Amino acid sequence: MKYFLLIISVLLLSSANAEEYKKAWFENKYRWTSTWIETDPNSRLDSFRKSAKWWSKNKEDKNIKILSCSKLVAVKVATARGNTSYGGICSVKNKSETNTAFVCNDEMVGHFSIQSKNKGPLSVNDLIQFVYDHCYGG
Protein backbone atom coordinates (compact mmCIF):
# COMPACT_ATOMS: atom_id res chain seq x y z
CA MET A 1 0.00 0.00 0.00
CA LYS A 2 2.93 2.32 0.69
CA TYR A 3 3.71 2.50 -3.01
CA PHE A 4 0.30 3.98 -3.73
CA LEU A 5 0.57 6.70 -1.12
CA LEU A 6 2.99 9.10 -2.73
CA ILE A 7 1.89 12.54 -1.65
CA ILE A 8 3.22 15.63 -3.37
CA SER A 9 3.68 18.55 -0.98
CA VAL A 10 3.51 22.19 -1.91
CA LEU A 11 6.55 23.70 -0.30
CA LEU A 12 6.85 27.23 0.90
CA LEU A 13 10.40 27.11 2.15
CA SER A 14 12.95 29.77 2.67
CA SER A 15 15.92 29.44 0.34
CA ALA A 16 18.08 28.42 3.32
CA ASN A 17 15.94 25.31 3.86
CA ALA A 18 15.41 24.42 0.20
CA GLU A 19 18.70 22.62 -0.41
CA GLU A 20 18.53 20.82 2.92
CA TYR A 21 14.97 19.74 2.15
CA LYS A 22 15.93 18.39 -1.28
CA LYS A 23 18.76 16.38 0.24
CA ALA A 24 16.51 14.98 2.98
CA TRP A 25 13.76 14.15 0.48
CA PHE A 26 15.98 12.22 -1.89
CA GLU A 27 17.86 10.39 0.86
CA ASN A 28 14.73 9.60 2.87
CA LYS A 29 13.64 5.99 2.41
CA TYR A 30 10.07 6.91 3.43
CA ARG A 31 9.33 8.94 0.30
CA TRP A 32 5.73 7.75 0.08
CA THR A 33 4.70 10.20 2.78
CA SER A 34 4.86 13.94 2.81
CA THR A 35 7.74 15.38 4.84
CA TRP A 36 8.68 19.02 5.03
CA ILE A 37 10.93 21.38 6.95
CA GLU A 38 9.08 24.09 8.86
CA THR A 39 10.31 27.65 8.35
CA ASP A 40 9.86 28.55 12.04
CA PRO A 41 11.76 25.92 14.07
CA ASN A 42 10.20 27.12 17.35
CA SER A 43 6.57 26.96 16.19
CA ARG A 44 6.07 23.62 18.04
CA LEU A 45 8.04 24.58 21.14
CA ASP A 46 4.94 24.83 23.38
CA SER A 47 3.71 21.45 22.18
CA PHE A 48 7.12 19.86 22.79
CA ARG A 49 7.22 21.40 26.28
CA LYS A 50 3.74 20.09 27.16
CA SER A 51 4.67 16.61 25.94
CA ALA A 52 7.95 16.70 27.88
CA LYS A 53 6.12 17.75 31.05
CA TRP A 54 3.67 14.86 30.73
CA TRP A 55 6.46 12.42 29.79
CA SER A 56 8.75 13.40 32.66
CA LYS A 57 6.06 12.70 35.29
CA ASN A 58 6.92 9.01 35.00
CA LYS A 59 10.68 9.52 34.84
CA GLU A 60 13.30 9.82 37.54
CA ASP A 61 14.45 13.22 36.32
CA LYS A 62 11.65 15.76 36.25
CA ASN A 63 13.83 18.77 35.41
CA ILE A 64 13.93 18.45 31.61
CA LYS A 65 13.31 21.77 29.85
CA ILE A 66 13.25 22.30 26.09
CA LEU A 67 14.79 25.73 25.51
CA SER A 68 14.65 26.25 21.74
CA CYS A 69 14.86 24.38 18.42
CA SER A 70 17.12 25.00 15.45
CA LYS A 71 15.31 22.69 12.96
CA LEU A 72 11.77 21.40 12.78
CA VAL A 73 10.31 18.78 10.44
CA ALA A 74 6.73 17.69 9.94
CA VAL A 75 5.92 14.16 8.79
CA LYS A 76 2.40 13.57 7.54
CA VAL A 77 0.88 10.17 8.21
CA ALA A 78 -0.36 8.94 4.85
CA THR A 79 -4.06 8.79 5.63
CA ALA A 80 -6.89 11.15 4.81
CA ARG A 81 -7.14 13.75 7.57
CA GLY A 82 -4.40 11.84 9.35
CA ASN A 83 -2.07 12.78 12.07
CA THR A 84 1.13 14.78 11.60
CA SER A 85 4.22 13.93 13.61
CA TYR A 86 6.83 16.59 14.34
CA GLY A 87 10.52 16.41 15.17
CA GLY A 88 13.05 19.01 16.16
CA ILE A 89 16.74 19.47 16.79
CA CYS A 90 16.50 21.29 20.11
CA SER A 91 18.52 22.62 23.03
CA VAL A 92 17.46 20.74 26.15
CA LYS A 93 18.37 21.63 29.71
CA ASN A 94 18.63 18.80 32.20
CA LYS A 95 19.48 20.05 35.70
CA SER A 96 22.49 22.29 35.02
CA GLU A 97 23.56 20.76 31.66
CA THR A 98 22.39 21.99 28.27
CA ASN A 99 22.56 19.46 25.43
CA THR A 100 21.40 19.15 21.86
CA ALA A 101 18.71 16.52 21.38
CA PHE A 102 16.25 15.10 18.90
CA VAL A 103 12.70 15.67 20.14
CA CYS A 104 9.51 14.40 18.51
CA ASN A 105 5.79 14.22 19.23
CA ASP A 106 2.37 13.94 17.72
CA GLU A 107 -0.81 15.23 19.24
CA MET A 108 -3.27 12.59 18.11
CA VAL A 109 -1.85 9.50 19.79
CA GLY A 110 0.53 11.08 22.28
CA HIS A 111 3.85 9.75 21.06
CA PHE A 112 6.81 11.60 22.53
CA SER A 113 10.52 10.90 22.53
CA ILE A 114 13.67 12.78 23.38
CA GLN A 115 17.21 11.60 22.74
CA SER A 116 20.47 13.41 23.41
CA LYS A 117 22.61 13.79 20.27
CA ASN A 118 25.82 15.54 21.25
CA LYS A 119 28.15 13.46 19.08
CA GLY A 120 28.67 14.15 15.40
CA PRO A 121 26.75 16.38 13.02
CA LEU A 122 22.96 16.36 13.26
CA SER A 123 21.29 16.13 9.87
CA VAL A 124 17.68 16.71 8.93
CA ASN A 125 17.64 13.24 7.40
CA ASP A 126 18.64 11.73 10.77
CA LEU A 127 15.88 13.79 12.40
CA ILE A 128 13.30 12.49 9.92
CA GLN A 129 14.43 8.93 10.64
CA PHE A 130 14.11 9.62 14.38
CA VAL A 131 10.52 10.83 13.92
CA TYR A 132 9.63 7.69 11.93
CA ASP A 133 11.26 5.45 14.53
CA HIS A 134 9.77 7.07 17.65
CA CYS A 135 6.71 9.24 16.91
CA TYR A 136 5.22 8.18 13.57
CA GLY A 137 1.63 7.03 13.39
CA GLY A 138 -1.83 8.05 14.28
Image (cartoon, rainbow, N blue to C red):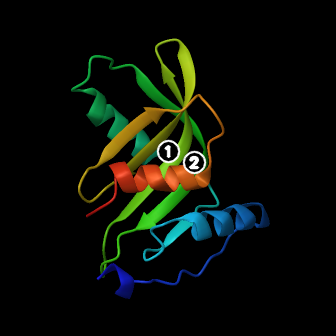
Q: Work out whether 21 lies above or below 103.
A: below
Q: Nearer the viewer, residue 117 or 87?
A: 117
Q: Position of residue 20 (x, y in %)?
A: 69, 61
Location of residue 136 by image quarter: bottom left
Identified at 58% across, 28% down, the residue is 118
Q: Amino acid at mark 1?
A: Leu
Residue 130 tag number: none
Q: How dense is the environment of label 1, judged by Cα within 10 Å: few (below 14), some, or many (20 and up)?
A: some
The residue positioned farthest toward the right in the image shown: 15
Q: Position of residue 41 (x, y in %)?
A: 60, 51
Q: How dense is the environment of label 2, judged by Cα within 10 Å: few (below 14), some, or many (20 and up)?
A: some
Identified at 41% across, 24% down, the residue is 64
Left or right: 41 with respect to 92?
right
Element type at mark 2 = loop
- Label 2, label 1: how far apart the Cα atoms are: 5 Å
Q: Nearer the viewer, residue 75 or 66?
A: 75
Residue ID for mark 2: 42
Q: Position of residue 71 (x, y in %)?
A: 61, 49
Q: Amino acid at mark 2?
A: Asn
Residue ID for mark 1: 45
Q: Are marks 2 and 1 in contact (CB under 8 Å)?
A: yes
Element type at mark 1 = helix
